[in-house]
Image (cartoon, rainbow, N blue to C red):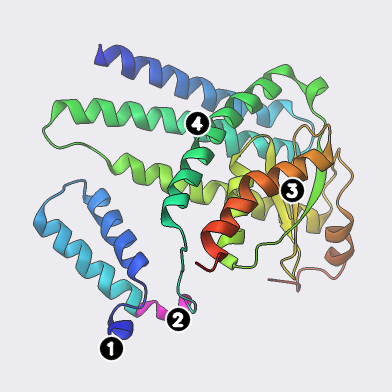
């Protein structure tokens, strides 16, 4: 029973991680490609980690919960790196399918000295 | 005196829990070691945290996190479907969200939440911290998206971090 649950979770996790990576190849421009790694992979890794919790908790008397930390760190860092990548791309005026936002455009002209 | 010893009680709690999860063993000895770290680290890093973190309504934060977790689940399925559907379904657009939030931590949480939830990534924050530019993967109605972000995520964050009760 528990093995079935672990297997199903691993398959779900692998599928979502794969779809997230597929997004990198399939989507049109830099900004849309950003969406794959920030989303599809969080669920993918999440499912794999739940599988890990189940697998390692049933064998021993101590519950294995440090996977929770991986999830927390991932949920904190993935959006931050995506935000920084998008911000850098706006500065460099990377080609975009969607018209770039006017505010960011006007201020990015001053170059990289504008930090905040 | 207490303020000097314990500048950030929340950080102490979080660090203690983090330590327990890191060593993956829940014994009294590890709890004490974690508590020690939780007391020492905030004292040494005081300059990174000029303002104490204030959470007006902690329980609302729990509800908010549960809601976001659910939204992340939905977001993953939605984005996976968009990726598999291919370029025909993708209508990307940049949307500017005017911010009513003022606390830096709350703005960071909002930006993170936006990035984790359906089809949106926060892309740029204006230097005066009043506008958050969001990139949507499939935007059919920009005004509706702004409205959703403001009511679904920003409103609760204002209640949690900036209400004065």
- In the picture provided, is B52 more to the left or to the right than A28? left
Chain ID, mark 4: A
The chain carrying label 3 is B
Foreground pick, B138 / A105:
B138
Check disc 3 and report the residue beneath it: B134
Which mark's residue is nearer the viewer, 2 or 1? Answer: 1
Q: Earlier in the sequence, mark 1 or mark 3?
A: 1
The quarter of the picture where residue A10 lies is top left
Q: Which residue is mark 1?
A: B1
- Where does label 2 land, which residue? B47
Q: Are marks 2 and 4 in contact (CB under 8 Å)?
A: no
Q: Position of residue B156 (x, y in %)?
A: 58, 51
Q: For residue A65, what is the image quadrant?
A: top left
Q: Find the distance from the CA under tag 2 to the CA under tag 3.
A: 31 Å
Asked if residue B99 is among those painted magenta in the image, a careful observer would answer no
As rendered, which of B153 and B75 lies closer to the eye? B153
- On the same chain, marks 1 and 3? The answer is yes
Q: Which residue is mark 4?
A: A43
Q: Secondary structure at mark 2?
A: helix
Circle 4 SS class: helix
The residue tagged with tag 3: helix, strand or loop? Answer: strand
């Amino acid at each position: 029973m528990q093995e079935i649950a672990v297997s199903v979770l691993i398959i779900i996790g692998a599928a979502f991680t794969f779809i997230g990576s597929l997004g990198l190849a399939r989507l049109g421009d830099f900004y849309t490609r950003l969406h794959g790694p920030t989303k599809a992979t969080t669920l993918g890794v999440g499912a794999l980690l739940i599988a890990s919790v189940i697998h390692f908790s049933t064998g021993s008397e101590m519950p294995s919960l440090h996977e929770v930390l991986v999830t927390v760190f991932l949920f904190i860092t993935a959006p931050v790196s995506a935000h920084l990548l998008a911000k850098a791309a706006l500065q460099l005026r990377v080609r975009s399918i969607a018209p770039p936002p006017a505010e960011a455009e006007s201020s990015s002209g001053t170059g990289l000295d504008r930090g905040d | 005196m207490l303020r000097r010893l314990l500048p950030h009680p929340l950080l102490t709690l979080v660090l203690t829990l983090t330590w327990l999860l890191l060593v993956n063993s829940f014994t009294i000895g590890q709890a004490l070691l974690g508590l020690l770290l939780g007391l020492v680290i905030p004292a040494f890093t005081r300059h990174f945290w000029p303002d104490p973190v204030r959470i007006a309504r902690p329980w609302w934060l729990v509800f908010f996190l549960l809601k976001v977790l659910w939204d992340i689940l939905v977001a993953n399925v939605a984005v996976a479907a968009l990726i598999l559907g291919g370029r025909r379904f993708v209508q990307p657009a940049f949307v500017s969200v005017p911010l009513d939030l003022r606390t830096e931590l709350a703005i960071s949480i909002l930006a993170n939440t936006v990035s984790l939830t359906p089809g949106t990534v926060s892309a740029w924050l204006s230097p005066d911290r009043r506008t958050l530019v969001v990139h949507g993967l499939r935007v059919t109605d920009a005004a509706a998206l702004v409205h959703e972000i403001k009511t679904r995520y920003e409103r609760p964050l204002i209640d949690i971090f900036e209400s004065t009760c």
